[in-house]
Image: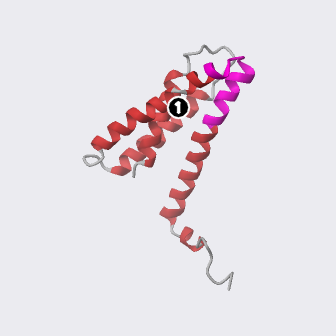
Amino acid sequence: MWGSKPLVDLRRLAHRNFAVGCLLIFLFGIGIYGLTTILPLFYQTLMGYSATAAGITVSPRGLGSIFSALVVGSIAAKVDGRRLVALGFGMFGAMSFWTSFLTLDLSLSSLFWPVALSGAALPLVLFW
């Protein structure tokens, strides 16, 4: 009775497109939410920022997401969704690569663009 109908049918992963999509969204989730968790801890423990300063420093991600969601909502009907998703993955990959060169010689505003643009990638990836 319990094993006759599984909650998640893993045979669906036999379809290549679905499996690749699941893998990409899984890796994107690890990247976006891992960075959201690690950056404030980096600022507080290694850089000596207060909790308020660390929160202000990572807040451009939310601002980038809001702005990008407005833009994506207005152009979604005019542009192929696959292109928007590819642009979002590309932007997030580039911003992740940019933040991989972090050192302790950072100012409070030096990560504004990588954090804001990685936040802008979120609605691009998740809109469709």
Query: Percent x, y for residue 26?
Result: 58, 52
Would you name the residue on which mark 1 appears?
Answer: 95
Judged left or right of residue 53, residue 126 is left
Q: Is residue 98 above or below residue 2?
A: above
The answer to which image quadrant residue 55 occupies is top right
Query: Percent x, y for residue 74?
Result: 28, 41
Q: Is residue 4 magenta?
A: no
Q: Nearer the viewer, residue 111 or 40?
A: 40
Query: Percent x, y for residue 65?
Result: 44, 35
Residue occupying image coordinates x 53% and y 38%: 93
Judged left or right of residue 121, residue 36 is right
Q: Secondary structure at mark 1?
A: helix
Residue type, numbered disc 1 = Met
Query: Percent x, y for residue 37?
Result: 65, 36
Q: Is residue 123 above or below residue 53?
A: below
Q: Nearer the viewer, residue 98 or 25?
A: 25
Q: Quadrant of the N terminus?
A: bottom right
Residue occupying image coordinates x 42% and y 47%: 85
Give the main secondary structure of the magenta stretch. helix
Count of marks placed on residues: 1
Judged left or right of residue 39, residue 12 is left
Residue occupying image coordinates x 64% and y 39%: 34
* Disc 1: CA contacts within 10 A as few (<14), some (14-19) or many (>=20): some
The answer to which image quadrant residue 23 occupies is bottom right
Q: Is residue 40 magenta?
A: yes
Point out the stretch of residues depicted in magenta. Answer: 35-53
How does the figure colour the protein chain or chains? secondary structure
The answer to which image quadrant residue 71 occupies is top left
